[in-house]
Image (cartoon, rainbow, N blue to C red):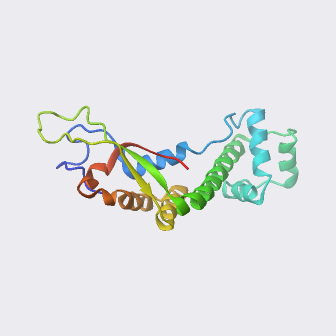
Amino acid sequence: MAGRWGSRDGFGYYGAHGVPGWVALEREMNRQVTGITSPVESERGLAARLRYLTASAAGYAAMERAGISVTRRTLFAWLAAERVPSRQNLRRIDAAYWDLRRRRLAATWKRRLAERGTRIEIHPVDQEQVRRDFPGHARDLTVRRITVRGHRIWDDIIDGWLTGNSELLDAAWDDIIYDLGSEYDSYSYVSSVGFGL
């Protein structure tokens, strides 16, 4: 991770609020994963998830990763709404659905972002509560916009996000803010991050 935001006892000592940059990046990526809003417990939500999962080999692989191991007969009964999965299998179906949504978005991101990159908007930490009795510790920070390009960095970001590898995401965040020069440490913690395709 980038530096400790200039405080002798760690981030937040002087009253700034934020999160490590890689955490904000991961949150933004999670926010962009969209899909079925009906709960899996509802008839509509379950049916939509099962149709999505059973429409491709990737969906069956997602169900396997989620620990769903039922007979074809049981699966067909679920699809026909003749039987309702157990509570545990409902959770697994939901997990498999969101896993597949994430993987498909990751593939789209890898294809598009590695080729042309994208602009990342970095919102600095909230300094409203910085202790004013420590002169010089509030910083004049602005929203920064950085264009991030390249297969390696986007592969690392997406792979880190997909696998939950915080070390890979943290290292990628350091690469993103490296070119900020003397302001590098000021953006190791941020309020939020935004980007689009």
Question: Could you say which quadrant of the image residue 86 lies in?
Answer: top right
Q: Quick one: quadrant of the N terminus?
A: bottom left
Residue 152 placement (x, y as % from top left): 48, 67
Q: Is residue 75 above or below residue 117?
A: above
> 63 and 89: which one is in front?
63
Residue 54 placement (x, y as % from top left): 79, 52
> 178 and 41: which one is in front?
178
Which residue occupies 72% across, 53% down? Answer: 68
Looking at the image, residue 56 sits to the left or right of residue 141; the answer is: right
Report if residue 171 is visible in the image.
yes
Which residue occupies 52% across, 48% down? Answer: 29
Which residue occupies 71% across, 35% down? Answer: 41
Residue 64 placement (x, y as % from top left): 71, 58
Looking at the image, residue 79 sits to the left or right of residue 177; the answer is: right
The total of numbered circles placed on residues is: 0
Q: Is residue 115 above or below residue 146?
A: below
Residue 145 placement (x, y as % from top left): 39, 48
Report if residue 1 is visible in the image.
no
> 186 and 43: which one is in front?
186
Q: Is residue 57 above or below residue 42?
A: below
Farthest residue toward the bottom? 152
Question: Could you say which quadrant of the image residue 36 lies in?
Answer: top right
Which residue occupies 53% across, 60% down? Answer: 116
